[in-house]
Image: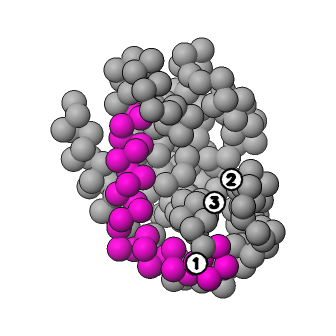
């Protein structure tokens, strides 16, 4: 899952939200450097990533990317899931998505001094460009794919290639998201309760 989904599946808990968003910037034993509420978010992020990777709908969706993107299909799929979440009428309207994005930025901003420097740098772009809100736009998905391609050492194609898969298989990918998201919500609610 990508940033919007991790924030959404933190269920409005500010510490868990911040912990989920920094998890990819915290390696190994460095997790112990953070207070318990943030550590909980980091643990939940990692559990959600593992759950996402092994869910049957995600496996189906990754197969659509595999011919052109190989193992990078999962990275592109994370962004695709954020797009469908942002456009999910059962979970957001554009006004509620905008408010959710602002609430998320505020929660993270309050904790910013204790978060990893690399995350703080990235977060300044996320907030100023309002990534969480703009995931509802297809052009923002193209830009996100472009960022993945630029940061990748080994991905051999321009962003047009995975973006073409996204457009060509839009309905099938949406079906995968629809099969996945209720299961992910139930999984995260249960795990969050267990960790409380």
Q: Which mark is residue 66?
A: 1
Q: Position of residue 75 (x, y in %)?
A: 58, 60
Q: Secondary structure at mark 2?
A: helix
| 32 lies above or below 81 | above
Determine the CA span between mark 1 and mark 2: 26 Å
Q: Residue 83 appears in which quarter of the rendering?
A: bottom right
Neighbourhood count class around disc 2 (C-alpha, 10 Å): few under 14, some 14–19, many 20 upward: some
Residue in the image at 72% along x and 29% along y = 121
Residue designated by label 2: 134
Cβ atoms at labels 3 and 2 below 8 Å apart: yes
- Range of residues picked out in magenta: 41-69
Which residue corresponds to the image point at 30% horizontal and 48% vertical from the top-left? 188
Of residues 94 and 194, the one nearer the viewer is 194
- Give residue 10's position: percent from left, percent from top: 39, 40
* 141 left or right of 36 in image: right
Q: Is residue 95 above or below residue 88?
A: above
Q: x, y (%) of residue 41? A: 39, 34
**Secondary structure beneath label 3:** loop
Q: Position of residue 139 (x, y in %)?
A: 76, 64
Residue at image position (59%, 54%) is 94
Label 3 sits on residue: 136
**Mark 1, secondary structure of its residue:** helix
| Dominant secondary structure of the residues highlighted in magenta in the image | helix
Per the model, the C-alpha gap separating discs 3 and 1 is 24 Å
* Dot 1 or dot 2, earlier in sequence: 1
Q: Nearer the viewer, residue 101 or 37?
A: 37
Tag 3: Cα neighbours inside 10 Å, few (<14), some, or many (≥20)? Answer: many
Instruction: Classify 110 as above or below 175.
Output: above
Q: Can you say which quadrant of the picture contains the C terminus?
A: top left
């Amino acid at each position: 899952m990508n940033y919007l989904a991790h924030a959404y599946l933190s269920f409005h808990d500010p510490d868990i939200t911040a912990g989920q968003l920094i998890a990819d910037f915290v390696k190994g034993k460095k997790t112990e450097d953070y207070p318990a509420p943030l550590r909980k978010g980091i643990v939940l992020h990692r559990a959600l990533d593992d759950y996402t990777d092994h869910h049957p709908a995600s496996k189906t969706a990754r197969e659509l990317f595999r011919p052109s993107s190989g193992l990078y299909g999962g990275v592109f799929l994370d962004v695709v899931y954020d797009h469908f979440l942002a456009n999910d009428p059962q979970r957001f309207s554009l006004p509620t998505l905008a408010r959710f994005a602002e609430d998320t930025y505020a929660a993270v901003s309050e904790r910013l001094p204790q978060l990893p420097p690399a995350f703080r740098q990235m977060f300044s772009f996320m907030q100023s460009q309002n990534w969480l809100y703009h995931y509802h736009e297809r052009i923002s998905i193209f830009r996100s794919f472009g960022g993945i391609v630029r940061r990748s050492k080994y991905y051999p194609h321009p962003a047009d290639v995975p973006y073409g898969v996204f457009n060509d298989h839009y309905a099938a990918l949406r079906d995968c998201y629809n099969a996945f998201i209720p299961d992910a919500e139930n999984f995260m609610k249960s795990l969050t309760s267990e960790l409380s």
